[in-house]
Amino acid sequence: MSSSPLSGELPETQPPGAAEADPATRIPLKIEDWLTVLIMGALALITFANVLVRYFTNSSFAWTEEFSVFLMILLSMVAGSAAVARDRHIRIEYFSESGSMARRKRLSQFGAVMVAALFFLIAGLSLRMVFDDYRFEETSPGIGVPQWWYSVWLPIVSTAIALRAVGLFVRRGKQVDEEETPS
């Protein structure tokens, strides 16, 4: 019997492996999931409020665009952290899906090391930027709040992404060791 949407069964539309459970991590991935939900909710509320104000008053809140841009950047970084932890970051499948299982695991580990190195570097360099924003009393262009209020999140979330990549490296290493040891 074929499965169709009319029979109550949904056709499989997810990519292979998408229905897999989240990997076991020391810090739960629910943190990123809930932050994503909260940020998306805040973006929707801010945008909706601005649309209503524009519709009824022909003017808009000055702070909504600046804050929305900040939230979108934060959203992409939080989602990037979840993608790294779930090993769903972008890769060239020709290389990552070919060869032996050990080769694929080593490539995954190499990718995790490179992601960790990049985001630790971003975190370190952005700390200096935050310090400069604070020291020189930079203000945001739209509403004039201290710029470091926005920029302080870059080293924090970059460090979180780097630590998720380190966790992925460790998990992949354990998988390689378990598969290579004879039982």
Image (tube, grey):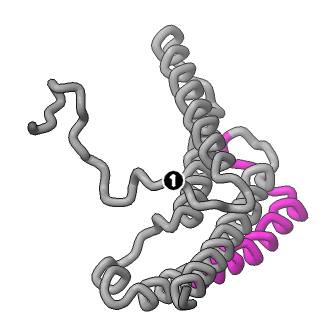
The answer to whether residue 115 is seen in the rendering is no
* Residue 134 is covered by the magenta coloring: yes
Q: Is residue 99 left or right of residue 27?
A: left
* Residue 64 is covered by the magenta coloring: no
Q: Residue at x 58, y 61 (%)?
A: 23
Query: Hey, which residue is sitting farthest top in the picture?
Result: 56
Amino acid found under the numbered disc labelled 1:
Ala
| Residue 75 higher or lower than 127, as above or below | above
Q: Quadrant of residue 154?
A: bottom right
Which of the image's four quarters has the N terminus?
Answer: top left
For this rendering, which residue is in front, 111 or 156? Answer: 111
Q: Is residue 177 left or right of residue 163?
A: left
Judged from the image, the secondary structure of the residue bearing numbered disc 1 is: loop
Q: Quadrant of residue 183?
A: bottom right
Q: Position of residue 18 (x, y in %)?
A: 39, 54
For this rendering, which residue is in front, 181 or 119? Answer: 181
Q: Position of residue 59 (x, y in %)?
A: 54, 19
Q: Residue at x 80, y 64 (%)?
A: 130
Q: Main secondary structure of the magenta part?
A: helix
Query: Hey, which residue is sitting farthest left in the picture?
Result: 1
Q: Position of residue 31 (x, y in %)?
A: 68, 47
Q: Residue at x 51, y 14 (%)?
A: 52
For this rendering, which residue is in front, 8 or 133? Answer: 8
For this rendering, which residue is in front, 7 or 87? Answer: 7
| Residue 141 higher or lower than 65, as above or below | below
Name the residue beneath numbered marker 1.
21
Q: Residues within 10 Å of mark 1 (few under 14, many from 20)?
A: few
Give the residues drawn in magenta, as a range: 113-142
The answer to whether residue 54 is seen in the rendering is yes
